[in-house]
Amino acid sequence: MCEKCKGNYYITTPIYYPSAKLHIGHAYCTVATDTMARFKRLQGYNVMFLTGTDEHGQKIEDKAKAAGVTPQQFVDNIVTGERGVLDLWKLMNISFDRFIRTTDDYHVAAIQKIFKRMYDNGDIYKGVYKGKYCKPCESFWTESQLVDGKCPDCGGEVQDAEEEAYFFRLSKYADRVQDLLENTDFLEPRSRVNEMVNNFIKPGLEDLCVSRTSFTWGVPVDFDPGHVVYVWIDALFNYMTALGFENDKYDDLADFWPADVHFVGKEIVRFHSIIWPAMLMSLNLPLPKKVYGHGWLLLDGGKMSKSKGNVVDPYVLAERFGVDALRFFLLRSFPFGSDGNFSNESLINTINVDLANDLGNLVSRTVAMAQKYFGERLPETQTADDEKDAELLALVSSLRDKYEEQMEKFAFQNALAEVFKVISRANKYIDENAPWVLAKSQELKPRLARVLYNLLETIRVCGGLLTPFMPDTAAEIARRLGGARMDWDSLNGFGVLPADAATVAGSALFPRIDVEKELAALEELNKPAVPALEIEPYSEEKVDFDTFCKSDLRAVKVKDCKSVKKSDKLLCFTLDDGTGTDRQILSGIAKYYKPEELVGKTLVAITNLPPRKMMGKESNGMLLSAVHTEKGEEKLNLVMVSDAIPAGAKLC
Ligand code: ME8
């Protein structure tokens, strides 16, 4: 630890499944973790911020197979490929110190050692895993994973099945884990404690299956070939292997373990607050100080998906609205511990109200006035503060403490609310003091200088406290304030800027967005791309051979073809079917052909269908045609065969 530092601080995000591209919900937790890491650095801590990817498991193996690549190629593409996970974190200005991939060699080797240690101490034993098996998918499922009793992947029937597997003695740690949850601040928010204890521990903790033989994409159990470590030992221990636990790649355990906090989404709180401490207890390792289970970003009250009419691709959002605006929105709009409803409209409104109107205007107006009335620097001759200034000064002076109190509780929304209270007050202060009136009198110039100084100081403190949320914006604000100090100590008081503070003019920090226009543009972007060519799905239903052979297919020659009165669909064909008697068939293809272009063609007809009346005319059979969809438009082509085939020839 460095001598000047306040101490070490270790914070982590969950490691993401690279089974598909990440959406804005995934970015939510990472932005929150980044903000916390930056806040701790600002306070003076020596921070280790870990994130990464959780790359093993059947789902990845299956997806790679479907894509025709190896599992490693599949995850490499999503993690390190263009617009992958690493690109996204770079774009979002995520200041992680370490990135772990569970396919990294050092991690794989460490997991094998960890598994063996728990096996040797008797906490991992061999047993039989009973579950439901889907044959076509070659997948095991638990009862609770089934959807309406069927395979959640293909919807097919499942059957009872067993496979040999290793189990972790989770049940042995039930009492100690319950005590940890109920009698310490290990898990927050507190509301999640009851959920864990009542739903999972009290009904009886079962031992946990920790190996599989039904797939191979995992860390091999080195002392029992055929078994791979099943997900949670592999995933959870990333938090320690990334510091050097059971490997020589890193040597940071002494400095950073136990972690100060693991940020995790609510659906994986169970794994982090029950299974993770139990595994650490098994190895007599110190437990992390805290697990914080945050809420979900929802779309229309439900799970996030692309199809719900909102753009959720963080790349698109960051590129259109700016990274800082997007980061800000995520933490300003939703209380971190609860679910929140995401919408493009609320994103735009937040940018317009908080960033363009309140923050942006305060900075633009103040800097523009300082420049207009005094040029590059304020004059040192200023009046002392007025009574009118007291409220603003008191608010700014106490802001850092209030903000810090909220940040320490991970209450990002409340911390921002404190800052924006001061920003609003400062905008009101401009109107109350009407600098443009003060500017008219030479005598009032020292007062005008003081008003502007107070505003610049307010902007400096607010800008500094916004650094963890909007690092680029804060840096730009510091620049406009002539390179103002924004370090932690300087944010605790009023009067840090020199009296002759410099200012630098610039364009609007956050231009206002036209809500209607932008929503329309996003809707356009969200329209699914029309596939160039679509064919009808193949029928699953089988036809037996004899039934198929009953269809009498014949080559027929078009003697005449006419449109049908009062019908814009039908064409009426007079056909030579080789019998010597003309056959009449009506076909609904007028949209696709002009009648005259078909005369003389050799077509295929099913001739033994019962006669049908259409628009008062009798149709004796059906002409075969091929249908497909091109760029969203339905196309039809009559099946035409070689003119060398005589009328009446049977097709079989
Ligand atoms: O769970 N809103 O990975 P993952 C907020 N590999 N958070 C969301 C979200 C949403 N709409 N959708 C997902 C895993 N998340 C495991 C973790 S840790 C040892 C292993 C969050 O990619 C989710 O809650 O499925 C989780 O915390 C994180 O994204 C990663 O999810």
Image (cartoon, rainbow, N blue to C red):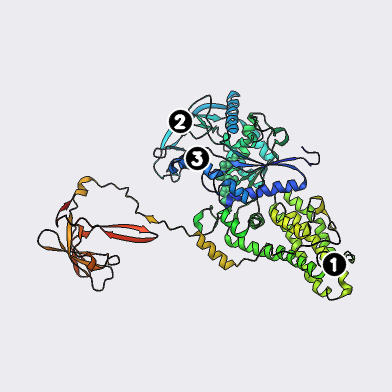
Amino acid marked by disc 2:
Glu
The residue beneath circle 3 is 73
Image coords of residue 459 (percent x, y) = 77, 60
Amino acid marked by disc 1:
Ala
Of circles 2 and 1, which is in front? 1
Q: Upstream in the sequence, badge 3 or badge 2?
A: 3
The residue beneath circle 2 is 163
Q: Are marks 2 and 1 in contact (CB under 8 Å)?
A: no
Q: Is residue 452 left or right of residue 136?
A: right
Please say if 213 is above or below 484: above
Q: Upstream in the sequence, badge 2 or badge 1?
A: 2
Amino acid marked by disc 3:
Gln
Q: Is residue 591 left or right of residue 427?
A: left
Which numbered marker is on residue 449? 1
Of circles 3 and 2, which is in front? 3
Q: Mark 1: which secondary structure?
A: helix
Image coords of residue 255 (percent x, y) = 73, 35
Cα–Cα gap, marks 2 and 1:
79 Å
Q: How many marks?
A: 3
Mark 2 Cα within 10 Å, few/some/many (few <14, many 20+)? some
Mark 2 residue's CB less than 8 Å from ligand 1: no
Please say if 43 is above or below 221: below
Image coords of residue 80 (percent x, y) = 56, 44
Asked if residue 429 can be seen in this view, the reply is: no
